[in-house]
Amino acid sequence: MNFKMIHENYNVKDLDASLAFYDQALGLKEVRRKTAQDGSYIIVYLANSASDFELELTWLRDHPQPYQLGECEFHLAFRTDDMQAAHDLHERMGCICYENPEMGIYFITDPDGYWLEIVPIRG
């Protein structure tokens, strides 16, 4: 029996802000969307051509307040082929929340406070 990871879900307060962030920061584009007939939720799947893994963003009409993420002791990691250009972009965006130069990695946060790890290609 085999299992393949296909997506990770993040619940978001402002879907438009999240879509703009993920597009600008990581090049993730909307690939499909599910909207409840009664408007109670919208689910958007994001991806890029580098992987078939998707990020699922869920917006809930009846949850307008920010999500409580605890201590953010979880994250989704992204590998980049140009660490300096990625760091420069994220620095301009003001979304870098933690850097670990010793390990050669850093983290950014999305509009809801989810941490995203940025790692270089290692030989």
Image: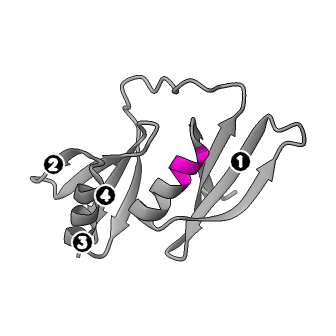
Mark nearer the N terminus (2 vs 4): 2
* Residue 3 in sight from this viewpoint: no
Query: Helix, strand or loop at disc 2?
Result: strand
At mark 3, the secondary structure is helix
Q: Which residues are magenta?
A: 15-19
State which tag comes first along the sequence, 3 or 4.
Answer: 3
The residue under label 2 is which amino acid type?
A: Asn
**Of marks 2 and 1, which one's residue comes earlier in the chain?**
1
Foreground mark, 2 or 3? Answer: 3
Tell me which amino acid carries mark 4.
Ile
x%, y% of residue 26?
42, 63
The residue at the point 57 percent across, 40 percent down is 14
Disc number for residue 100: 2
Q: Is residue 66 above or below residue 92?
A: above
Amino acid type, residue under disc 3 in the picture: Ala
The residue tagged 4 is: 118
Which residue, given by chain and number where applicable, does mark 1 sit on? Answer: 43
Return the residue at label 3. 85
Kindly report which numbered mark, 2 or 1, lies closer to the viewer in this rendering: 1
Question: In 3D space, how far apart are the residues under numbered discs 2 and 4 (Cα atoms)?
Answer: 10 Å
Query: Who's the residue at 28% across and 64% down the image?
Result: 89
Label 1, residues with CA under 10 Å away: few <14, some 14-19, many ≥20 = many
* Residue 28, image x, y percentages: 52, 65
